[in-house]
């Protein structure tokens, strides 16, 4: 039997007032993505169609064009509650018959690994609705899962509507559900606002189905933190730390040395090969790649950079997008590189900024090198600095792009390079020192 079609709805139209922010909650950054992108990625892995994100009018412009292909947007005009938010997706699902995964866009810890068995359990039981529950250390403000004597789900009660006995229940609602589509729409049509928050609760849809005698189920997650929702800045920080731990653990498992997991922040799309070493307080962002045996940090920040095999990235190094260190290359202490390629075995050991530059194999760029991209005009591509192989630059060299230093050339210390240097040449005209002996005698007040 082919499985019923699967659609999905991510609810992300709430205002998130508990964040105390001008920025809508779901657009807050969380380890390299926006909060809602974590839910969208987890749900997207199931391949649902249609796949709808419900947003507020205020977030629409920012979300348009920034979600994965195949994701449609629906607008909830006013935040009238999670039930109303789900109902706002209905037009986008017109004519759909099958199961609908509904996920709150503020539950970034839920993964495909939690959703797939939930859908499976729902289908196995032939349920009208199945809720993903979890048992956090502190059930706090979560909706409590209330079961009958036989252990069947009866309803979900919000903490603000719960009696003291109900509040004592430790199993809570994660805001992740699977509904049979028609059951969902008919139950949503019966919601009311007769509750402490005066909202249309999605949780009440489950109660209506249970009241009707429809099969409703609970799938209990084993991870006590999986359903943690982000409602405040403290929640956002906690979720960030949790996601960081997960990502770091996966790299440790795969053979990467991470000296201090608690201070190492690695975004989800970063790739690190086995036997790389990441030192404390290092931040690896975007599509950064660190190859086998490379060493990075401490206190290094890499964004969309590639670090080759056995390459070294020193303390306080900032590698910006488009930077490639070839094998055994070195970017040392207080070095900033942007859109720069450093050849095999080449070194930029100290206190330098190289942007839009190429450095050839085995070249040494001495301390204090700076590339200058002027003269350039806004909108024109940045001119490049090309430094050949086996070059020795001097300390405190400036390079006025576009400029090319030939292979094997040497540049004198203190030089500002404005013209191309042919291979094997010695170039540079450092200003010579002027010494006026005794000049100050009798001129000072001492
Ligand atoms: C909700 C659940 C609660 C559960 C908890 C898990 C309800 C009534 N309560 O509470 O049982 O334990 O999640 O995290 O569902 N949203 C809209 N439009 C609205 C209101 C909310 O799109 O009008 C979205 C929010 O943006 C959010 C999600 O729905 O992503 C959940 O809403 P939120 O206000 O965070 O509900 P909780 O109080 O966390
Ligand atoms: Mg929430």
Image: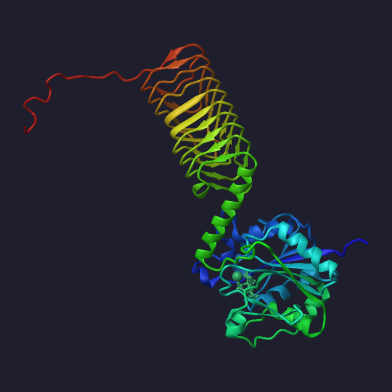
- Give the residue displayed 61% in from the left and 63% down from the top: 225
Q: Quadrant of the N terminus?
A: bottom right
Q: Residue furthest top?
A: 424
Quick one: 262 or 335, which is closer to the camera? 262
- Give the residue displayed 26% in from the left and 19% down from the top: 433
Q: Residue furthest right?
A: 1
Residue 441 placement (x, y as % from top left): 8, 24
Residue 219 placement (x, y as % from top left): 74, 68
Quick one: 294 or 423, which is closer to the camera? 294
Quarter of the image for residue 185 reads bottom right
107 over 256 or under it: above or below = below
Residue 339 visible here: no
253 over 368 or under it: above or below = below
Quick one: 396 or 280, which is closer to the camera? 280
For residue 438, side relative to residue 283 (left or right)? left
Q: Quadrant of the C terminus?
A: top left
For residue 333, side relative to residue 438 (left or right)? right
Residue 33 placement (x, y as % from top left): 60, 54
Residue 123 visible here: yes
Mark count: 0
- Give the residue displayed 64% in from the left and 58% down from the top: 37
């Amino acid at each position: 039997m082919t499985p019923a079609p699967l659609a999905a709805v991510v609810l992300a139209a709430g205002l998130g007032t508990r964040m105390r922010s001008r920025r809508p909650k779901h657009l807050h950054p969380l380890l390299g993505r926006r909060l809602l992108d974590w839910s969208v990625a987890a749900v997207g892995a199931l391949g649902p169609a249609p796949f709808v994100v419900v947003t507020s009018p205020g977030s629409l412009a920012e979300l348009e064009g920034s979600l994965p292909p195949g994701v449609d947007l629906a607008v909830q005009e006013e935040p009238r509650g999670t039930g109303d938010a789900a109902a706002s997706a209905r037009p986008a699902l017109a004519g759909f018959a099958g199961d609908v995964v509904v996920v709150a866009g503020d539950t970034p810890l839920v993964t495909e690994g939690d959703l797939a068995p939930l859908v499976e359990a729902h289908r196995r039981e032939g349920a009208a609705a199945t809720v993903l529950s979890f048992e956090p250390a502190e059930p706090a403000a979560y909706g409590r899962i209330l079961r009958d004597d036989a252990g069947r789900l009866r309803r979900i009660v919000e903490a603000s509507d719960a009696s003291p006995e109900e509040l004592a229940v430790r199993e809570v609602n994660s805001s992740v559900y699977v509904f049979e589509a028609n059951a969902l729409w008919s139950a949503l049509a019966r919601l009311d606002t007769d509750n402490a928050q005066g909202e249309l609760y999605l949780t009440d849809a489950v109660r209506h189905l249970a009241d009707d005698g429809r099969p409703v189920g609970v799938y209990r997650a084993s991870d006590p933190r999986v359903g943690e929702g982000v409602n405040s800045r403290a929640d956002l920080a906690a979720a960030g730390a949790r996601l960081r731990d997960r990502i770091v653990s996966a790299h440790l498992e795969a053979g990467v040395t991470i000296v201090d997991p608690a201070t190492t922040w690695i975004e989800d799309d970063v790739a690190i090969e086995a036997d790389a070493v990441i030192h404390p307080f290092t931040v690896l962002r975007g599509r950064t790649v660190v190859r086998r045996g490379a060493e990075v940090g401490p206190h290094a920040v890499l964004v969309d950079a590639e670090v080759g095999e056995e390459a070294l990235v020193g303390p306080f190094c900032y590698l910006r997008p488009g930077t490639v260190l070839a094998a055994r290359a070195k970017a040392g202490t207080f070095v900033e590189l942007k859109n720069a390629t450093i050849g095999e075995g080449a070194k930029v050991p100290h206190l330098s900024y190289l942007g839009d530059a190429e450095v050839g194999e085995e070249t040494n760029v001495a301390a204090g090198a700076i590339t200058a991209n002027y003269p350039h005009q806004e909108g024109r591509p940045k001119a490049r600095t090309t430094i050949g192989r086996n070059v020795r630059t001097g300390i405190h060299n400036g390079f006025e792009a576009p400029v090319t230093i030939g292979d094997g050339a040497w540049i004198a210390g203190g030089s500002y390079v404005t013209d191309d240097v042919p291979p094997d040449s010695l170039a540079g005209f450092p200003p010579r020192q002027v010494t006026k002996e005794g000049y100050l005698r009798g001129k000072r007040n001492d």
